[in-house]
Image: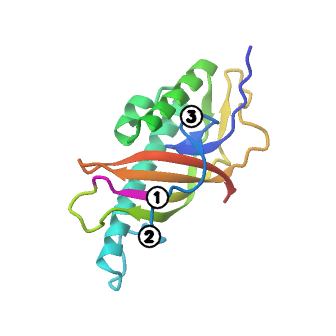
Amino acid sequence: MTRTTTRLRGVAAAAVLCLGLAACQSGGDEPGVPEASPSASASPSPSVEPSQAAIAERAAEAEQRYREYLEITDRHRIEGTRASQELFPYLGEPETWDGVEADDDLYATEGLKQVGQTRIASIKVTGYDGDPLADGIGGHRVKFAVCLDNSEVDVVREDGTSAVRKGQPRRTIVKVFMQGQDDGRWTANKFTATDKKC
C-alpha cells in the first residue's frame, strides 16, 4: 500500500485546501500588477477618489467569488466528491482547471477526505489591473494576499490516519489572482502558495 503524505496549503482555489497538488504553484510576485487600496471594502468613505471606490467595489465582488470557490471546494473535499464540475464557472485558466482535476484525482485515488473547514483569517487587496471606471470587468485582475487558516483542518486516509505532512504550517499566505470575464464573472486564474506564516 502506498502512503501519501501531503501538506496543507491554500488554493483553491484555491483554496482552498491544497495538498502539495497541481492547483497551487510556488513562486514570486506576479509582475505588472500595480498597488491598489489595502482594503476590499465595498463602502468607501466620501473622500475616496472615484477610481479607488470602483476598485474597492470590484475587489469586494472578486473576493466574494473567491470565498464561494473555497466553500465549494471544502464541501466536496469533506464529502469525498469531485469538485471540478461545480467549480468550472469559477475557474479562468486551463492550468487552474487542471489543478482542480488533479486534486480530485488524488483524493479519489488515495481515498482522502478533509475533516474541518478552511478559514480565511485575513484577505488584503495588493493590486488591481484594468480601468476601474470602465463599464465592464473583462480582462481586469485583482490580486489578493490571503491568510488561510487550516488549524482545524486535517486530511485523512481511509484508515483514519492523517495524510498531512508533519510540521506543515497551519496558517500561510496564498497569493490569489482573480480575473474579470466579459460576462461579468470573476474567475480564479492563479494561486501561488507561499511558506509565509500569518
Q: Earlier in the sequence, mark 2 or mark 1?
A: 2
Q: Residue furthest bottom?
A: 47
Q: Earlier in the sequence, mark 1 or mark 3?
A: 3
Question: Which sits in the foreground, 171 or 51?
Answer: 51
Q: Position of residue 114 (x, y in %)?
A: 60, 34
Q: Is residue 6 left or right of residue 98?
A: right
Residue labelled with disc 1: 143
Locate residue 153: give its quadrant: top right
Residue 6 is left or right of residue 72, and the answer is right
The stretch drawn in magenta includes residue 139: yes
| Vertical comparison of 107 with 24: above or below | above
The residue that mark 2 highlights is: 36
Residue 175: x %, y % from top left: 54, 53
Q: Residue placed at 20% from the left, 62% from the top?
A: 135
Amino acid, disc 3: Ala
Residues drawn in magenta: 138-142
Q: Are marks 3 and 2 in contact (CB under 8 Å)?
A: no
